[in-house]
Amino acid sequence: MEEQLKLGERLTELLTTKNIDNKTFAENIGVNVSTVGRWRNGQKYMRLSQIVKIADYFDCSLDFLSGRSDVALDFQPQKPPAFYPHLRTLLKNKGITRTQINRDTRVKSSHFVDWKNGSDPHIFSLIELADYLDISLDILIGREKF
């Protein structure tokens, strides 16, 4: 839950700094205005595709958006590849198995099955994986080169 609160605080900070209201922001990223309010209050989870849209909108990194970094952007973002194949490549490069992740984190086998079938991971799983792999969220999803 702490991660969701940080995201909400950072989103509020970005909207306030740029003088953008919830309605304008919601229209620009293609969500309902009530969704923006729930994100800001930490009442709704963000999914990968939503976080990328927000980071692109504000020209910032996912780590900045999530409160994991105070540096807005220090690389040139790329269009992220499909999440699951990219994750498999990262795990192979790091010599880490799904079994290890299942054992050592709250990310379970069912998450991998969902991702393989095209489901977007939510922010909690992304943060947990990035922490476990000791990489940025942007590297995890392929916006930044490994």
Image: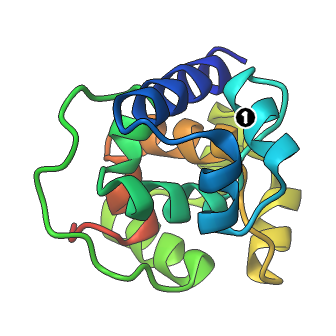
What amino acid is labelled 1 in the image?
Answer: Trp
* Image quadrant in which you'd find residue 112: bottom right
Any part of residue 49 in sight? no
Q: Is residue 110 left or right of residue 84?
A: right
Q: Is residue 36 left or right of residue 16?
A: right
Q: Nearer the viewer, residue 65 or 17?
A: 17
Q: Nearer the viewer, residue 34 or 132?
A: 34
Q: Count up the numbered dots.
A: 1
Q: Residue 119: x and y, percent? A: 80, 73
**What colour scheme governs how the chains and residues are painted in the rendered image of this protein?**
rainbow
Compared with 115, 55 (above or below) is above
Q: Is residue 6 left or right of residue 99?
A: left
* Image quadrant in which you'd find residue 7: top right
Question: Residue at the location (64% across, 44% down)?
Answer: 123
Q: Is residue 95 left or right of residue 109?
A: left
Compared with 76, 24 (above or below) is above
Compared with 59, 33 (above or below) is above
Q: Nearer the viewer, residue 4 or 15?
A: 15
Any part of residue 84 in sight? yes
- Is the residue marked by circle 1 packed among few (<14), some (14-19), or many (20+) residues within 10 Å? some
Q: Residue 17: x and y, percent? A: 35, 29
Quarter of the image with the C terminus is bottom left
Question: Residue at the location (85% across, 70% down)?
Answer: 114
* Image quadrant in which you'd find residue 34: top right
Compared with 146, 23 (above or below) is above
Which residue was labeled with disc 1?
39
Question: Residue at the location (52% across, 33% down)?
Answer: 11
| Residue at the limit of the structure toward the left, as seen here | 74
Q: Secondary structure at mark 1?
A: helix
Question: Residue at the location (73% across, 18% down)?
Answer: 1
Q: Residue 51: x and y, percent? A: 57, 55
